[in-house]
Image: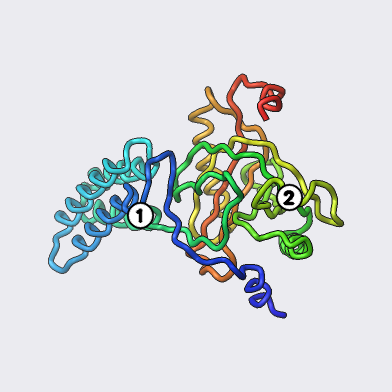
Amino acid sequence: MDIRCLFAFLLAGFTALALTWEVAGAEQASGGVRIQAAEVLQRALREASMPGVSPKKQREILVQASKSAAARLGPGALAAQRLNSAVQQAETPPGGSPEAGATILRRVLTEIEKDLSFRLLVEAKQPTGFPAPTPVGEVEVKTYPAYRKARAETSPNLAFWTLFSHIKKDDIAMTAPVEMVYTFGPISQPKEQNMSFLYAEPGLGKPGKAGSVEVIDVPPMTLVSTGVRGAKTEPSVLGARRRLETWLKANRATWMTEGPMRTMSYNSPFVPRDQNYFEVQIPIRQVGQKVADRTEQR
């Protein structure tokens, strides 16, 4: 049986649905502020590309759209900060050239529009109580409930099939995301340590060793998370980690790192790589909060 047939079996019974972002109550439907901001940028990019529009007018159109989209997103959104930064660059380009300003804005707005309009294709349910995925390009603090997972500590390809055999044998439904934990080391040297499939309910199965798979109960945890679109490559993972490290540095008076980085991947090989979505996350705890205190809370 080839790999596509195996994945077809793995994903049987799952219906692909468009996911609506629900983050901190800010986005409640497909017409939320991210979509509204994306539409503002889409219209401006089309208008600025029409024949006969001068470079000066192009820059004016894109500046106004950037400001409008940033206002819709709010000052706390990283996309808004990127838009405001692009406007600053565009209004003082090298030599004061309108062409340079329009080029800067067109490049930045195109990427931000893709981030804002991205929608995750859902192929499997998340475990009960899990928070909604983090919007692409944003950073947020998320709390996860206790959950049960099956973990394999081999190379990624072997781990996947080891875990697949385990859930197939025990008749455990596949969920999304798939968790990959990395060794806790320098930012420039991420190394995959283990992979886990997550059980839909913490009461399914039972903890313990099952051959090369270990079923583990994970206590509630807090993580800082960022959403990423596209293939999960080393550069994309490192870029997301740098975004988290920047956030941690800015919030070091409140939060501190507590464990190794992990990725949470949501899509199968059936989804084109440029439409994939994953999260990069780092466990954190409040400064001054003792580990023992957290254990008691769990």
Place of residue 161 in the rendered image (x, y in percent of width and height, measured from the top left): 74, 65
Tell me the quarter of the picture where residue 117 sits: bottom left
**Which residue is at a point 53% across and 33% down the rendered structure image?**
248
Place of residue 285 in the rendered image (x, y in percent of width and height, measured from the top left): 61, 29
Which amino acid, mark 2?
A: Gln
Place of residue 57 in the rendered image (x, y in percent of width and height, measured from the top left): 14, 55
Viewer-nearest residue: 64 or 265: 265
**Which residue is at a point 69% across and 41% down the rendered structure image?**
185
Q: Which residue is mark 2?
A: 193
Query: Which quarter of the image is occupied by the C terminus?
Result: top right
Can residue 88 be seen at all in this image of the molecule? no
Q: Which residue is mark 1?
A: 30
Nearer-N-terminus badge (1/2)? 1
Query: Which quarter of the image is occupied by the N terminus?
Result: bottom right
Left or right of 140 in this view: 71: left
Which amino acid, mark 1?
A: Ser
**Which residue is at a point 30% across and 41% down the rendered structure image?**
84
Residue 43 versus residue 261 in the image, above or below: below
